[in-house]
Image (cartoon, helix red, strand yellow):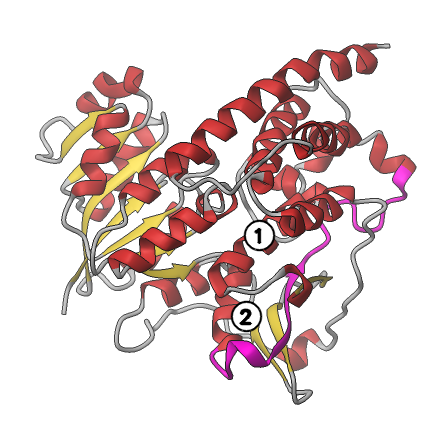
Amino acid sequence: MTRSLTILGATGSIGRSTADVVLAHRDEFRVEAVVGGRDATALAKVARRLGAKFAALADEREGEALKQALSGTGIGNGAGHSAVLEAVEHDADTVLAAISGTAGLAPTHAALKPGRRIALANKESLVCAGSAFMADARRLGVEIMPVDSEHNALDHALAAGLNRDVEKAVITASGGPFRTWARERIAKANTKEASAHPVWSMGSKINIDSATLMNKGLELIEAHHLFDLEVERLDVLVHPEAIVHGLVQWSDGAVTSGLALPDMKVPIANALRNQGRLKMNLPRLDLAAIGRLSFERPDEERFPCLSLAKAVLKAGGAMPTILNAANEIAVEAFMADRIKFYDISELVESICSTFSGRNNPAPATVADALGIDHEARQAARRLIPVYAEATRL
């Protein structure tokens, strides 16, 4: 049976991998709509390649370029917020949500429709508005399938038992480019060094989050909402080979885990499956050839963003929303060479401390989450010049 699919974030790394999965199973998928950010040429290319019915760019200024790029194809198109929402409204069985950052929250939430499946690769939907998002998904009967390799692995591993019998659910980290670096050397790291992820090919912002280990902190918050597990039952292990993506320690001493070669097409195919698994022509995991899998505990002194995220998850309320907003502004400033590497964690901690003394209930709606996000971003932007001045000295 042919299934209909909409791809939000079609021009990013997850979107491109999704296109490969879909094209490997042309008879099983019909692509309704594709959404991109601002690259009209790239979006037109993927829309043609997948035979999409509609294409939308978030950047309204690029609407004419998209129109020209799709001229003569018969593919409907538009640009701006309303066009993105039009794409979301297309009648699709599954929506793959891979728009990066808080920009993906509103369209991903809008994609929640009765009976739909959301293949979720947008962290911010759960980090910024997890309680509200998941409550709406449950109310509407929406199935949420995690696309991140770690959460997809946990989804597999947790199927072996009951939630109440989970002692620890563990996600793994490659350790990023600075795993073996001394703190003094990390402090002097530049943007190019921080972006050099040793395993995955990802967007620039996610690469920096991997270098700080903030991405693992955000993934813990995601896991809390996806699997209804409190922070005490969640943990992180550094695993440089990136073969074991998640594992579960059970109350009887047994451990189940999800293993795969580091290729995002594996969890994407799993999230898009229907009655059975999609057959993928990918290299197979050969443990004998790999020979050795190693693990170590993360060093939260060298990577304080991880401990910050754990503290925020424990505090609850709106603190995860605030953490994420401050981190996005700090990473943006680091990528622009305005602040130093460890200024990221210091700035985020400062913003979280500023807000922690207030009454910060968890956002009840996505609109509430976006309002809190805006306030925290403004506070973080006001601090950037202080760190930027210190960088220049």
Is 90 left or right of 159, judged from the image as shown? left
**Mark 2 to mark 1: distance in Å?**
23 Å
Residue 238, visible in the rendered structure:
yes
- Name of the residue lying farthest toward the front: 359
Can you give x and y, in whole percent of width and height, for residue 38 in the image?
Answer: 36, 25
Q: Is residue 180 in the magenta section? A: yes
Can you give x and y, in whole percent of width and height, for residue 89 in the image?
Answer: 18, 42
**Residue at position x 68%, y 74% in the image:** 290
Note whether 168 is above or below 117 in the view shown.
below
Residue 117, visible in the rendered structure:
no
Is 48 left or right of 188, judged from the image as shown? left
Is 82 left or right of 58, judged from the image as shown? left
In the image shown, does 85 or 211 lie closer to the viewer? 85
Q: Give the range drawn in magenta.
A: 159-183
Question: Of the residues shown, which amino acid type is indicated by label 1?
Answer: Ile
Q: Secondary structure beneath disc 2? A: loop
In the image shown, does 279 or 313 lie closer to the viewer? 313
Q: Is residue 172 in the magenta section? A: yes
Can you give x and y, in whole percent of width and height, for residue 259 in the image?
Answer: 57, 73
Quadrant placement of the C terminus: top right
* Residues at circles 2 and 1 in contact by the CB criterion of under 8 Å: no
Which residue does the numbered mark 1 point to in the structure image? Answer: 221
Quadrant placement of the N terminus: bottom left
The image quarter containing residue 137 is bottom left
The image quarter containing residue 298 is bottom right
Label for residue 260? Answer: 2
Can you give x and y, in whole percent of width and height, for residue 70 in the image?
Answer: 17, 29
